Image (tube, grey):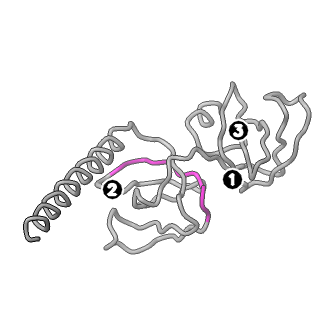
Amino acid sequence: MLRRSIGSAILLASLTALLSGVLNFESARAQDRPTPFWLSLKFDEVRMRVGPSQQYPIDWLYKRQGLPMKVVREREGWSLVQDPDGTQGWIADSQLAASRTAMIVGEGLATLHEEPQAASKLRWRAEPGVVGKLLRCRESWCEIDVAGRSGWVAADRLWGDDEVASAR
């Protein structure tokens, strides 16, 4: 019985070490990305801190899953991010998702079209602040999906991706 317990303990320790190595490799690989790049908030509630650890005070509490964030810098499991209003702070990497999202910005309603051109059929309109999944960008247009409704919007009405930013 003692041999089985020792064998199980060794196996568990080996698996833990292997998993830790894989996670550390993934974390290191994630930090190899050139900044800036874009992520989004993973949860309905995410805290932004004034520094890169839980010891720093909370500066903002976001209550918007999917909100796009621009990663400016990374440090040991934390990302210095910028939100759509220009506010910068630190968010734990575990609170950020790789999902590509974009937010409608600017004044008035944004028109979303069937094709990436202003003359194409109007599908719907979205208010500034609406966040959707960024599907793809072409020239100065991007296709977004908001709760299952997709359409093409002028890239200068979006915030949340390098392709969008370069189209401005």
Q: Look at the picture and state if 81 lies above or below 116.
A: below
Q: Look at the picture and state if 119 lies above or below 101.
A: above
Pointers 3 and 1 in contact (C-beta within 8 Å): no
| Chief SS of the magenta region | strand
Q: How many labels were placed on the picture?
A: 3
In the picture of the structure, the residue carrying the numbered disc 1 is: 131
For residue 80, the mark is: none
Q: Residues within 10 Å of mark 3 (few under 14, many from 20)?
A: some
Relative image position of residue 58 (x, y in whole percent)? 43, 73
Q: Is residue 78 left or right of residue 40?
A: left
Residue at the extreme left: 3
> Could you tell me which secondary element the residue under label 2 belongs to?
loop
Relative image position of residue 54 (x, y in whole percent)? 34, 71
> Could you tell me which secondary element the residue under label 3 belongs to?
helix
Q: Quadrant of residue 140?
A: top right
In the picture of the structure, the residue carrying the numbered disc 2 is: 77
**Number of the front mark, 2 or 3:** 2
The amino acid marked with disc number 3 is Asp
Give the CA distance from mark 3 to mark 1: 15 Å
In the picture of the structure, the residue carrying the numbered disc 3 is: 156
Give the CA distance from mark 2 to mark 3: 32 Å
Q: Residue at x 75, y 54 (%)?
A: 128
Instruction: Give the magenta range.
Output: 64-74
Q: Residues within 10 Å of mark 2 (few under 14, many from 20)?
A: some
> Could you tell me which secondary element the residue under label 1 belongs to?
strand
* Of pointers 2 and 3, the one earlier in the residue sequence: 2
Q: Residue at x 50, y 52 (%)?
A: 97
* Of pointers 3 and 1, the one earlier in the residue sequence: 1
* Of pointers 1 and 2, the one earlier in the residue sequence: 2
Give the CA distance from mark 1 to mark 2: 26 Å
Residue 40 located within the stretch drawn in magenta: no
The amino acid marked with disc number 2 is Gly
